[in-house]
Image (cartoon, helix red, strand yellow):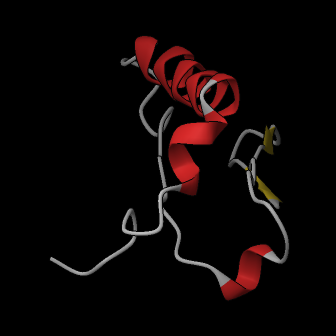
């Protein structure tokens, strides 16, 4: 995507079935401040749980507006 001021890569991850740009989305942002070291670990854990439990994401009413 881009680089930090220090020249490090900024990583992004997309999880999708089909064309991601045509579906609703959630952005989970972490690691913005170096003082909060647990954020990236939690973000990866959330992605792993989505992949492990992907059948839960196939419910037709999951993306309904509330």
Q: Residue at x 73, y 39 (%)?
A: 6
From this view, report whether residue 10 is shown above or below residue 41: below
Relative to 14, does residue 7 appear above or below in the rendering?
above
In front of the other: 8 or 25: 25
**Would residue 9 be found to the left or right of residue 47 on screen?**
right
Report the label total.
Answer: 0
State the image coordinates of residue 18 (x, y, percent, origin top left). 85, 71
Left or right for 66, reference 22: left
- From the top left corner, tell me how far across and down residue 60 is, in percent: 47, 68
Image quadrant in which the N terminus is located: bottom right
Q: Nearer the viewer, residue 4 or 32?
A: 32
> Residue, x 75% and y 54% (percent of image)?
14
Residue depicted at x 37% and y 17%: 35
Quadrant location of the C terminus in the rendered image? bottom left
Q: Is residue 31 above or below residue 61?
A: above
Could you tell me residue 52's position as x and y percent?
67, 22
Front-lying residue, 49 or 10: 49
Q: Looking at the image, which residue is at 41% across and 32% down?
A: 33
- Residue most toward the left? 66
Residue 36 place in picture, x, y as percent: 37, 19
Q: Residue furthest bottom?
A: 22
């Amino acid at each position: 995507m881009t680089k930090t001021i220090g020249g490090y890569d900024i990583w992004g991850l997309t999880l999708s079935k089909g064309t991601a740009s045509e579906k609703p989305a959630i952005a989970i942002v972490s690691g913005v401040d170096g003082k909060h070291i647990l954020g990236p670990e939690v973000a990866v854990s959330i992605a792993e749980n989505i992949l492990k439990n992907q059948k839960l994401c196939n419910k037709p009413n999951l993306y309904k507006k509330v």
